[in-house]
Image (cartoon, rainbow, N blue to C red):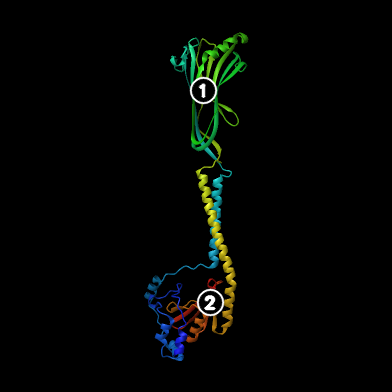
Amino acid sequence: MENKDKKASKFKFAGIDDQEEVKSSDKIEGSFKEIQKKEFENKSLKDLVDASMQKPRKVPAPEELDRTKHKVKRSMYLSFETRVALRVVTILILFACACYFILEAVNYGKKELVTYDEITEANYNVCQNTNNYFDSKCLEEGLKYNQSTSNFINIVFKYNMNYSRNVPYDIAYHVVAITKIYDKENNTKVLFKNEDVLVERTSISDISDHIFFDNNINLEYKRYNSMVTENEAKYGKNSEASLEVVLYLDTDEEAVNVASVTIPLNEKTFSIRKSALSNLQKTMELDNNTWNNYNTMCAVIASILIILSLMILYRTTLLVLKVTNNKNKYEEYLNKILKTYDKVIVTAKDGYVVDSTKKIIKVAEFSELLDARKLLDQPIIYSKINSVKSEFVVEDESKAFKYVLKDSDL
């Protein structure tokens, strides 16, 4: 009897199998040695076997099974192949998202339509003859003016551009006074032309949703009128003259006239004409290739996604290598068990599930399962779970001993 106690004391318990539905009242307490003392003490092996065969099987009521089903929590098991597949899909998704944010960051081949309103103003007043401009009496625009009493013409140009969003711009402007003498009958026939730059080329650049600048020009009307009078004899009385003050907007291709004031010269009384732009709700195609906060955010997100995908790829590679290396050890160990104990092992072709009413006792070593088999005098049932996991079970009418062989344990 002492030998039986020593033999039974070798068993170790790993707990209840979380994949089986087990009644809460049947939880295992204590070690296999304690169970053996309670149930097998002072009995021979033959008596134990006979008792096991004669012991009536307890079938729980349906309501008890339902209650047990709710009490036992199952943990989801993912096979090695599923885990690898999920990681590969995650890596591909992360790389795809990273590529999207990289393209957003560099705005590759991206063009954008931007709406804008472009408005210019040209205002003026005519100041009477005096030696001091600031003490002059000035007349408002839209009147007829006397040549002899007009000395200064004060011109104000304003330029305003409003975009639908912030855009980068780099533009320039300048103001020119153009004096022309042309044929009265054919004003396209220019007899004399002179240009004075009143405002030198001025550049402005920024990133904004609007552009605004203005210029105040004090024009000496008397000087330009005298220039024409001196050339009147040369070109005859069949000629006319004008002074045009123009605001030019300089682009990469050309200088564009965006506002102007035209003043007749060598006339006793004259009226001033002006022109300006009023382009509302216009659209233009913009190459979006300027680095801004949005580009920076996309670049940071893309970097994080790439780092995460590389980390998952690294861990997946280690997992595959580990399983590949362990698989050989696992298969060798499994084949050794099946070959060595072929006489006492029965293979379940389509898997094997232990009755949920039985006590499930997990053992840590296969040798302990062999001890249980000898004690119960029952065959060992082998079932293959997957390529890296197998189960061995020995059971009688009320309990089952289980040994789980996994590649990760080797």
Residue at 62%, 9% in the rendered image: 234
- Say if residue 170 shows up in the picture: yes
Q: For residue 213, which numbered disc appears in the image? A: none
- Say if residue 160 shows up in the picture: no
Between 57 and 116, the one lying in front of the other is 116
Between 66 and 78, the one lying in front of the other is 78
Q: Which amino acid, by three-letter code, is at mark 2?
A: Ser
Q: For residue 383, which numbered disc appears in the image? A: 2
Q: In which quarter of the image is residue 193?
A: top right
> Residues at badges 2 and 1 in contact (C-beta under 8 Å)?
no
Q: Residues within 10 Å of mark 1 (few under 14, many from 20)?
A: some
- Spatial CA span between label 2 and label 1: 95 Å
Tag 2, which secondary structure?
Answer: strand
- State whether residue 385 is above or below residue 211: below
Q: In this view, does 113 lie to the left or right of 34?
A: right
Q: Where does the image place residue 247, in percent across and percent down from the top left?
A: 53, 24
Residue at 43%, 89% in the rendered image: 51
- State whether residue 137 is above or below residue 85: above
Q: What is the total number of numbered labels drawn onto the structure image?
A: 2
Question: Which quadrant: the N terminus?
Answer: bottom left
Q: In which quarter of the image is residue 252?
A: top right
Question: Which quadrant: the C terminus?
Answer: bottom right
- State whether residue 214 is above or below residue 393: above
Residue beneath label 1, please? 275
Q: Where does the image place residue 275, in percent across and percent down from the top left?
A: 51, 22
Q: Which amino acid, by three-letter code, is at mark 1?
A: Ser
Q: Where does the image place residue 22, in percent across and percent down from the top left?
A: 42, 75
Q: Residues within 10 Å of mark 2 (few under 14, many from 20)?
A: many
Mark sitting earlier along the chain (2/1): 1
Tag 1, which secondary structure?
Answer: strand
Between 203 and 123, the one lying in front of the other is 203
- State whether residue 276 is above or below residue 316: above
